[in-house]
Image: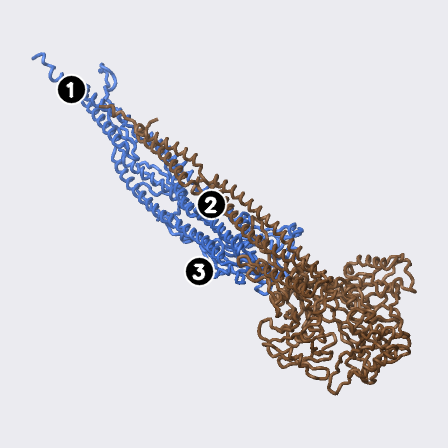
Amino acid sequence: MLRGTFLGLETSKKGLLTARAALDVTGHNIANANTEGYSRQRVNISASDPLSFPGAFVTIRPGQVGTGATVTSITRIRSIFIESQLHQENGRSTLYQTMSDAYIRVEDIFNEPSENGLNSLMDNFFNAWEDLSNDPESASTRTNLAQAGLAMTEFVNEQDRRLDREVMNINEQLQDRVDRLNQLNSQIAVINKQIIQIESGGDNGQMKANDLMDQRDRMIEEVSNIINARVQFNNDGSVSVLVQGHPMVSGVDFHEIRLQQNQQDLTRPYIEFSKSRIRLDIRSGELGGMLQMRDVELPTVRLEQEKLVTAFTNRVNKLHIAGYGLDGLQGRSFFTDYRTEQYGGSTALPAGTTLDTTLDQLGFTSGDFFIQGQRIEITPGEVLASTAITLGDLFQRIEQATQDVRVSIDGSLGFDRVVFEQYNPVDADTTLKIKDGSSNFFEQLGLDNATHQTFFLDPPYRNSLANFGLNPQVLSDLDSIAAAGDDGTGFPGPGDNRTALAIADLRNDNKALLNSSFGEYYQGLVSSIGATALTAQRSHTTQTLVVEQLVERRLEISGVNLDEEAVNIVKYQSAYEANARALNVVDEVLDLIVNRLGTVGR
Amino acid sequence: MRIPNTLLTSNYMADLQRVQQDMARLLRQTSTGKLYERPRDNPSAVSTSLNLSRVISSTTQYTRNVDNGLGRLNFTEITLSEVNTQIQRVRELTVQGSSTVLTRDDRTAIAQEINQLLEHTVTLSNSNFSGRYVFSGFETLTESFRINSNTSDGFTNSVTYQGDFGKIGRNIGIQRDLDVNFDGHSIFLDHTWQAQGRQMSGQPLGYSGTFEINERLIVVNPADTLADVARRINSDTLTEVKAEVSSDFRLQLTSLNSSKSIKLRDLAGTVLEDMEILPQGAFNKAQTGVTLPLTDSTGAIHDGGPLVYPLNLTTNLQDMVITLGGAANDGFTETKAIKLDAVTYNNAAELAAEIQKKADLAFGEDKLIVRDDGLGGIDIETNVQNSSVLIGDLMLGGTAPDGTADTASAVIFGYAGQTAAGFAGTDGNDRFTIDLGPDAYITRPGEEPIDLSPVEINLDASAATLQDIIDDINRQVLDNKYLSGLVRAEDDGGRLRIVTTATGTKVGIDDLVLRNSVPGPPVLATDTLGGLGFYVEATTGESAPPVPAQVQNTLAWPAPGVGTIIGPGNESFSIDLGPGSSIDGTDPAPVTITLPAGGFIDENDMAAKINNQIALSPILKNAVIAVVVNRGGSNYVDIQTTNVGSGVEASDLTLADVDAGMLANLGLAAPTIPGGGTQPGIGEITEADNMINTMIQLRDELLGYSAATSRLSDLHDVNGVSYDLAPGTEIRISSDGTTSSFIVQRFSTMQDLADAIEQQLGVSLEVEVQRDGRIRVFNPNNTVVNDISIEAYGLKGQRLSTFEERMSGISGRLIYRSELASRTTYEDERFQHLTNRIGNVDRALEKVTSTLAIIGSRTRRLDMTLTQNDTLTVNTLDLQNKNDNVDMAEAIIKLKERENVLNAALGTGSRIIPSTLFDYLR
């Protein structure tokens, strides 16, 4: 068998076309050198199938004859490994960024360090009490004190509103992000469909929808910023986007997620799949950050601040109620008092029992019990020591272990009994919990079969931040501010400043709140807010570097290098020229054959 | 490694961004000067910053507190320094005033100056510092002292503390505070009247009652505790008393008035008695008629409880009434009022001497023996020998049992054998008075007996013999309408005898009293009666003048005729305390006292050994004591309850022989121990020798005022006309339709009259004898007093119009004016008192200087605190500066550094985007 005369032409044509295609792809790369998310493309060229010359008569040369080159595919240069890493790190980066940004607002709510933060306001409040102690008779020190009190309570009330508003803002942003997520996912599903159509059109999967894939990748990246998604590549060129193993996009299918009202807590809607109602626990991405802020960080900050305010209210009020105002009356609280619950003993204490009665005198040996989860233990040593523990000491110990409990001897039922009362709890849901310990402590104190009473308040109590306020009676009549002490013999006189001194001294009470003073506690709170914010900010910085690294790595692989492309252009242009020249050779050969051969006889 | 073109730019941009972020941060630092603006910028530094700003804020506040305290202390210091000056001047004047060479005008001038000093001191005590009274305790808006000047001369009578005892503190640092005030009572009224009750408990009292404290009613309910009673007393400011309950549960009363005592009276129930608050002195609870352990006679003794000396008696004190009867008083029962002079008694002996003097005047000498019992109390005993004195023969504060005999006559003897001529009638100035008692007056039907005025007998200078004197006396008696037919002088065998003669006229022994007319201590030349040899004798004792009375030492140990205890020992007797001795009311078991063998050296030894045994018994320890008592010149061992706070009654202590005859051997063989358990709980009285009262008293003593103690019978008006208020005059006081009578007694004083008027008018009104001699009725509530009328009836029933005119009300007030005889009299004693008062002045001075010293030390402490605070503030500010503030140099250098980096980066920016191969391809 003979080789076809025009085989050379065909081969060169293929070469020309191949070079041309390569030049086109190179041009496309150059054109998209600065396109975001563009992956450079490569032309895969392979030699076309050769012709074989089998036969015993073939003497010229054995083997096959090449038929030129052909473009097998145009593929994107992209690393799936880096891509999936990037998705994860993106999620982490946005998690910290969201938290860091949100904490800026928390820090603003506390406004420290500044002249207007609670630290200064508390100082001013105590200083106002000191000033009152210096001049308990005057009206101006009382006005000053009321103003200092108002400044403090209003600041705390504003904190309450702003913490609430922060939660609302987060919920709005959550809705926005969920909407965006659904939009992205639905588009990914659409692109998936297009890709499947395109790629199924080619033979043996040679058809690549490179640019669509780039577009899809960009969307997936945005998804990974919002939520901790995992991407799964399917054989048909589509991808599935999974969150916690559940697909949001599965090939051409798109599963909507939504923000669902939480019936238990209307301020905390959660995220679930609309159809399957699978509830999502999101720990990463913007959504993760928002939920972390809303469900963990903000409640913690709020709880700590509430504890401070609860203890503050109760400590000040306890002293204030015992003191006498300038009008010669006692029994009024300085801050509004909300009594929510009461446990009252059913058994009478021995007649003549006072706060100075020692536990020993009450026939007490030792014991323990739990209040608000705190264990209170009285050892036999304390009962029998030379400075034996008194009922008053015990009450003080209980009050110091909690923030919202006040213990007293109550005679309202006609006999003396021990009464535990809860005042101004951190929030409306906090209940008074007392439980006897291993010994019969309650029996010894006449607290067995204690009667429990809950007080319904109108308007209902919210929390200690929202309800922190000056007693309206104190505000309307400044003489009811108690500066004078109590000797048990009536109003001691306008010059008495013992209650004012005692309240002013609360600032130095190292056991005012969980074994620290109010100032130290607040300082700890501010410092921990700062530390958390700083951690979030640092983590975000670190995470950004990681992402940048990955993006760099991706660019290294997928990015367009113009030098490279220029070389390619030169290369493919040369190839084109060379092919054309090869065609010329064949042409000349044919010309020789056609026009020159046989001219001998002419 | 491939470098795609975009990578170069994005890296470049990122780096540029970082530099710019740095610069932004540094720029912010330099513009705010702060290292951080939010907690995240440096959590621990922010925490430190908050802490430091708290320290600065509180330190600044503490400095403000210190400044405030210093202001107050400085003001107090200045005030007290001035008080110091006043008191020093008072001291000088007191020394000056006690000189005997001064004229009355001199003294008046000194008194006037003291009064000025007093007024100024009171003004100083009411000082206020920016509207706050510094000496009022917590009652800073109340004037510290109310001035009580009810007299027309405007002199301050007394002041009443209106503040309280509150201590005002200042916070001057963490857990550090300092008091910046001193209550006025502790400075100006240090030492006012006080009383303390017995030890009780914190439990409800369990009984009800009503008592009166300074004429204010206090009701006690069974549920009240001692503290409730105290609160009730305090809540009524008109009581002028501060009541407290001590840590051992005693009711303590402190007068808030500089000068007045605390008047206490049980109205219903026995609250005060139960509390044993007996500031009136020890006699309130003395038992009557306790049998003495005399072997051959029974007598009576009153064992007074211990008093606190010096004892300052004022006119507020009640009279002491002594009833003496039976053999101890020649068979007659008499009740006499003993009025003690309102002076200071420094010890029991002085008081005993005074009572003795008054008792002798009332009953005649040798009837009673009054002595210091060696325990701070006073014993009053009948002085009889070999006579049969019955229980009831001596009673204090009680009423005489009825049954006075209708005596034919009372006889008063002169000494036998003495010629009166040697003494009487030689100079014509000898005189004495014969005073017939009320029973000597022959009453018309329906008339009350009237005590007639004493009649003065002046002896003729020419009398030479006893008969001359008798004739002289009888002539004067006949001439006198009061004495005529009732009294006669006789020659009784060489003795002068004056007897009552009206047989059947109910003239008693006490109806004839002879007195020297010339006042003052008996001096031979003026002692007419003594000169006449008079002594008092019972009607039956005519045979011979009695041997001077003497108590025999029959019971002194070792008792005469009774063997000394030398036996083998183990002699025992038991002491049984009654229920009143224990606080809970249980009756303790009897305790046997066994005495050691070997006898005793003397009575002191015996008492000591009994006390040793007593100390071994928890029941008796501190409840019972054996003491050696000198009674009638002999020593006795008495076993007494110590009473303090134990509520022990006389009946609570009984002794019983365990070994037969033991008690007798010990001289204790009587059923009752004299005075045992009869002493009051604590009748603690402290003299009102405080600064203000001392000045008031100095002033008054120098002026010679003593209106309240003047006798009514001595009163005369400014023209010297007597009001004729002879003993027996009836003064009728009417108000609101009721009338009460006051019969003028021989010793009745202006204060007695005032008391009687007050009694009639009731508790809502107060009656006071003013220093100028007027009686003033006033209502503490400041309303007008209406409808009081006073009428006086003389001995014959005649209206005493001069007196009534003087007593007429002027604008609703009752004014009684008199020129007082006593004003002209300066007694040596008074100057003695003046000298005594220098001690009080010195103590007031010391109080002020010691307070000034305290102020000085506090001021120093505050000054030191100021310095400390300043240092602390500076150091803390420094720390805060380092902690919070930017080191500008550093920040600017860093900024410059970054700027350079940025500039360099921007400069090379164009080159960072390198040319590609395309630049070289044609």
- Is residue B196 visible to the viewer in this orientation of the structure? yes
Q: Amino acid at mark 3?
A: Pro
**Host chain of mark 3:** A
Q: Amino acid at mark 1?
A: Asp
A314 or B215, which lies in front?
B215
B833 or B400, which lies in front?
B833
Chain with brown colouring:
B
Q: Answer yes or no: are tags 1 and 3 on the same subunit.
A: yes
Q: In what element is the residue under mark 3?
A: loop
- Residue A526: which numbered mark, if any? 2
**Host chain of mark 1:** A
A164 or A280, which lies in front?
A164
Q: Which residue is mark 3?
A: A459
**Host chain of mark 2:** A
A212 or B191, which lies in front?
B191
Q: In what element is the residue under mark 1?
A: helix
Q: In what element is the residue under mark 2?
A: helix
| Pointer 1 with pointer 3, Cβ within 8 A | no
User: Mark 1 or mark 2, which is nearer the start of the sequence?
Assistant: 2
Q: Nearer the viewer, mark 2 or mark 1?
A: 2
How far from the left and from the top, in percent, is residue B559? 89, 64
User: Mark 3 or mark 1, which is nearer the start of the sequence?
Assistant: 3
Q: Which residue is mark 1?
A: A587
Chain with blue colouring:
A
**Does A369 sit left or right of A278 as displayed?**
right
Q: Quadrant of the N terminus of chain B?
A: top left
**Does A577 sit left or right of B10 as displayed?**
left
Q: Amino acid at mark 2?
A: Val
| Pointer 2 with pointer 3, Cβ within 8 A | no
How far from the left and from the top, in percent, is residue B58? 52, 48
**Does B548 sit left or right of B836 as displayed?**
right
Q: CA gap, disc 2 to disc 1? A: 88 Å
